[in-house]
Amino acid sequence: MTIWKPDLEVFQGPRYRALADAIERDMNSGRLPQGAQMPTHRELADQLGVTVGTVTRGYAEAARRGLLRGETGRGTFVGSSTRKDSYFEHHEDTTEQAVDMGMNLPLHHFDPDLASTFLKLSSQSDLQSSLRYYPSRGRHQDRELGVEWLREHHGLPTSPDRILITAGGQHALTVILSSVFRPGDTLAVESVTYPMMKSLARRFNLRLLPIPMDSEGMLPDALESACQQHPVHGLYCMPTTHNPTTAVMGAERRQALGAVAGRHRLMILEDDAYALLSDQPFRPLSADWPDLGFYIASFSKPVTPGLRFGYLCAPDAWVKRLEQGIADTLWMASPLAARIAREWILDGTALATIRLKKQESRERNRLCRTLLEGATLRSLETGYFVWLELPEHWNATDFAKQASEQKVIVTPIEHYLVGRERPPADAVRIAISGPDTHDQLRQGLSIIRNLLEEPAY
Ligand SMILES: Cc1ncc(COP(=O)(O)O)c(C=O)c1O
């Protein structure tokens, strides 16, 4: 184990951040070589005369910057993990008995029945045609159906020429980021955002500019002043359920944000992954800004993710570039998946599944609100996850760590943070859709409730 005693006095700001800054400086100077094992939290805390919590938080901040990695059961090492995002980390840590509320799994018990779908499809004369090549934007019949689906269920008027069939939301984001932006371009995002956007931005060398948010998502005035100070090329948002905070934009917020985007000609990446689970009516920003809005709709959360199916509705001027992006990544999204999606849309299975999943999440949210009564909880009637703001004596990293020691997995705010500014309250995301049964959910939430009441150290 490396003997390392940095002088934190030369750094300003909170001690945990000074510790991360010291790690960064000493890595750059070679004093902390790649692969070296860091002192344990307690050892370093004793050496520096700070609390163990400060070291834990400093290491977490350094891990967030890609400087350190934790290895389960071995310790903390210099150098980034290639697996940075919460999903992977959770799966690494998850044991059979854990209540895993890390990843928001979309209630697979209620997935459509694949066997009966296959039986039904087996007698359909057009099935064999699903094995052919088609234009990269997808078959015309699927794009036409997409027009109806988006109009009826997402409130988005469009035409088949503006629709591309994708292999889900993540694929749509990959294609947009790689086709519409150039390395070095800047995307405005909420200061807490979907972690895979951070990972994609790293991959494509895009800058993320964190914009303050409230319970309705990004603040238009803050976006306006950011646009006046920096060149900004696009904005990424999740208006109908922000992951992880559950913020939903009301009509006025959407209009105000759209107006800023319009004034500065920002491309709007509107990720409505959870829209169909929402009880509230909504109007996409892309409906008002068809020349700027890239609207992403996916079957993953409302229906099922294994299908890898989604619609991307794009401004006319960008469709060709995006089609090339699909060709470059996959040639085309699977026509077989589109054929199944078509069946489920036409025979009512998709809507019936959405109803069932909403009903189940309504019950889980009710249970969660009851068990965590008195806590500062942001939740939706039918959301898959809740955002738990922690009392002052807890920071999110420690809380998630303590929970995982009791075999309950939740995701701390660090995974979602962009930049160094932290919102006033630390928080964790709890994916209440994760556990298989209500009993497991109850067990996990009871542990969380007890932890909230405990002293942090
Ligand atoms: C906000 C958001 N966008 C996109 C996705 C990607 O989903 P998929 O690629 O399965 O459609 C997710 C998945 O968790 C998400 O939370």
Image (tube, grey):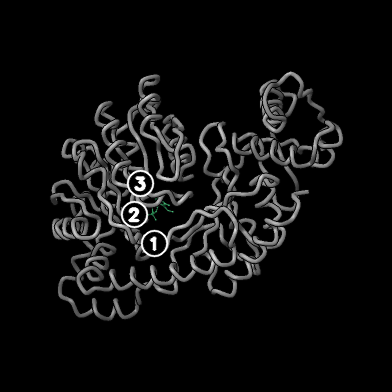
Q: Residue at x 21, y 39 (%)?
A: 289
Q: Residue at x 70, y 61 (%)?
A: 450
**Between 101 and 39, the one nearer to me in the picture:** 101
Q: Which residue is mark 1?
A: 305
Looking at the picture, which amino acid does disc 1 mark?
Pro
Looking at the picture, which amino acid does disc 3 mark?
Met
Classed neighbour count for the residue bearing mark 3: other residues with Cα under 10 Å, few (<14), some (14–19), many (≥20): many
Q: Is 290 situated left or right of 268 in this image?
A: left
Q: Is 399 situated left or right of 319 in this image?
A: right
Q: Is 82 situated left or right of 342 in this image?
A: right
Q: Find numbered disc 1 in the image and state the secondary structure of the residue it sits on.
A: helix
Which of marks 3 and 2 precedes in the sequence?
2
Quarter-of-image position of residue 29? top right
Which of marks 1 and 3 precedes in the sequence?
3
**Between 281 and 179, the one nearer to me in the picture:** 281
- Mark 2 Cβ and ligand 1 under 8 Å apart: yes
x and y percentages locating residue 312 in the rendered image: 26, 49
In the rendered view of the protein, which quadrant contains the N terminus? top right
Q: Which residue is mark 2?
A: 168
Q: Which residue is mark 3?
A: 249
Query: How far is mark 2 from mark 3, CA to CA?
Result: 23 Å
- Mark 1 Cβ and ligand 1 under 8 Å apart: yes
